[in-house]
Amino acid sequence: MNERLKEYDEKMNKTVEHLKTEFNSIRAGRANPHVLDNIKVDYYGTPTPIQQVGNVSVPEARMIQIQPWDKGMLKQIEKAIQSSDIGINPTNDGTLIRLVFPELTEERRKDLVKEVKKKGEADKVAIRNIRRDGNDAIKKLTKEDVSEDEINELQDELQKLTDKYIKQLDSLIDEKSKDILTV
């Protein structure tokens, strides 16, 4: 790959990684500890990820257990989960917190698939914006005595990169959609 395109390749790759991270937080009927990734707990005045204040485990397919290292954190963790947008009410038994994931309804599954497609589409737009920035930079090379053939070659390579990453996003979207629709 041409040195001039490395920067755009890295940006596009980061966009794909971003989508993978986004998809981890979308629950598909099974318990996935990643749904807690964006939830912060007030740990003595500092917003701290749940994974850093207790042990997070998945004892059953549709349950997450959180056992705080400091029992005084139970109420804080419970409050943080309730105020988050994961849509699950935590149960607190005095020593640990359980999150039971209900079976998804057909309607909820379809809504989640729409959300997946929306996030995927947003990242496709991001990749196209990176391509546009790359093309603008390539066009500016005409002032630096770069041949027209070289510029066309760079633009073709950039388009191939874009196609490659869009294809990756499409397969991620399809994979997550199938995962959600599988009962």
Image (cartoon, rainbow, N blue to C red):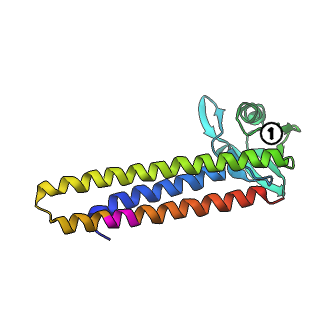
Q: Within 10 Å of the Cα at label 1, are there few (<14), some (14-19), or many (20+) other Cα atoms?
A: some
Of residues 38 and 26, the one drawn nearer to the viewer in this rendering: 26
> Is residue 62 shown left or right of residue 131?
right
Does the magenta stretch mainly form a helix, a strand or a loop? Answer: helix
Seen at 53% across and 46% down, the residue is: 122
Residue, disc 1: 88
- Mark 1 secondary-structure assignment: loop
Q: Position of residue 137 (x, y in %)?
A: 25, 53
Seen at 33% across and 58% down, the residue is: 7
Task: Using the image, determine if residue 172 lies above or below residue 25.
Answer: below
Magenta part of the chain: 156-160
Task: Using the image, determine if residue 13 lies above or below residue 87.
Answer: below
Residue flagged by tag 1: what amino acid is it? Ile
Q: Would residue 155 be visible to someone looking at this image? A: yes
Among all residues in the image, which is located at the extreme bottom? 1
Among all residues in the image, which is located at the extreme left? 145
Q: Position of residue 106 (x, y in %)?
A: 83, 49
Of residues 168 and 3, the one drawn nearer to the viewer in this rendering: 168
Picture quarter with the C terminus? bottom right
Residue 41 figure quarter: top right
Is residue 159 in the magenta section?
Answer: yes
Seen at 36% across and 57% down, the residue is: 8
Q: Would residue 51 be visible to someone looking at this image? A: no
Of residues 177 and 66, the one drawn nearer to the viewer in this rendering: 177
Q: Position of residue 88 (x, y in %)?
A: 80, 39
> Is residue 45 shown left or right of residue 149?
right
Picture quarter with the N terminus? bottom left
